[in-house]
Image (cartoon, rainbow, N blue to C red):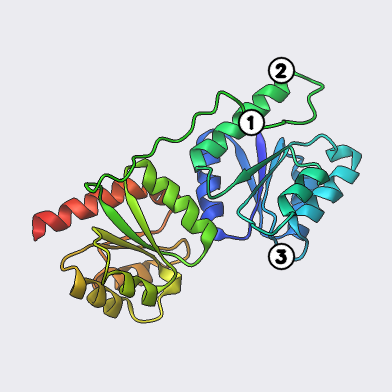
Amino acid sequence: MKKIVIVDDQPVLVNIYRTKFAAEGFHVDVAADGEAALAVIQRARPDLVLLDLMLPKIKGVDVLRILRANPSFKTLPVFVFSSSAQTGLVEEAWAAGASMVLSKSNTSPKQLVDNVIAALDARSTSADTAKVDGPPAAVKTIKTHPFDGKQKRILLVETNPEVRAVLGLVLARDGFQITNADGTAHALMLTEVVHFDLAMINEGIRCDTTERFCQQIRRRHASVPVVMYSMNATPAETKQALAEGVSRFITTAEQLLDAGVIANAAIDASRKAA
């Protein structure tokens, strides 16, 4: 069984990636900061590391430098996977010894897994391969559907740009057009000018009660389903949110990966009930 270490401090993304890799037969360890990453990598001796750049305690680039200075990890495949727009940081990662640099905003979970599998396959067939120079040609680009005015539109309320980018890719795969909101106030403002078929919101960014948010959304778009997601919600919190007007509550990474299917079902159900 191939072993991978995912180093990222965003729980939603970690759960998505861990679930996707586990489904492909990987053993997955996780670290939420640079200090923990070094300890986990030293202990687990993984086949590949997936490394975010913006980390607490020790930055991702510094983690990479420390690994490359250790003879045991000099040729360990390390994929830098980040949405950092900081000038020069990506170039710094390449210079520090990254095996591949991928953008969270342009790489779906499936594409990420495909890249990792292709890199490990190439490594296993060439004992002296120490570096992967770019995405393998065999990896296929995710198919999305250009907006034609007939697509269903989702209002995605998410403040974290990395989570927003990944969920956007997952939803675009199923043909949705995404309108992004940076918070509930922004979401309500957008409802005045944009038609949408469903609202999807991170449970952790509400500035008001769930019931009030659902009422405000539906004041502008009657019967529109509201889908909420959280990896940390308790059963009691989930039950309360559903009682307060949420149409569906996503609590697992598997469900988030099927967000498009869930959104379609919620939209169809709301239209039948209308």
User: 190 left or right of 120?
Assistant: left
Q: Tell me the residue that label 3 is attached to.
A: 56
Circle on res. 125: 2
Residue drawn at (77%, 31%) of the image: 131
Provide residue 167's location: percent of width, then percent of height: 44, 52
Packing grade of label 1 (10 A; few <14, some 14-19, many >=20) is few
Q: Are marks 2 and 3 in contact (CB under 8 Å)?
A: no
Q: Nearer the viewer, residue 263 or 25?
A: 263
Q: Earlier in the sequence, mark 2 or mark 1?
A: 1
On screen, residue 162 above or below 232: above
| Residue kind at label 2, given as amino acid type | Thr
Packing grade of label 2 (10 A; few <14, some 14-19, many >=20) is few
Q: Earlier in the sequence, mark 2 or mark 3?
A: 3
Residue drawn at (24%, 71%) of the image: 245
Element on which disc 2 rests: helix
Quote the CA–CA distance across marks 1 and 3. 30 Å
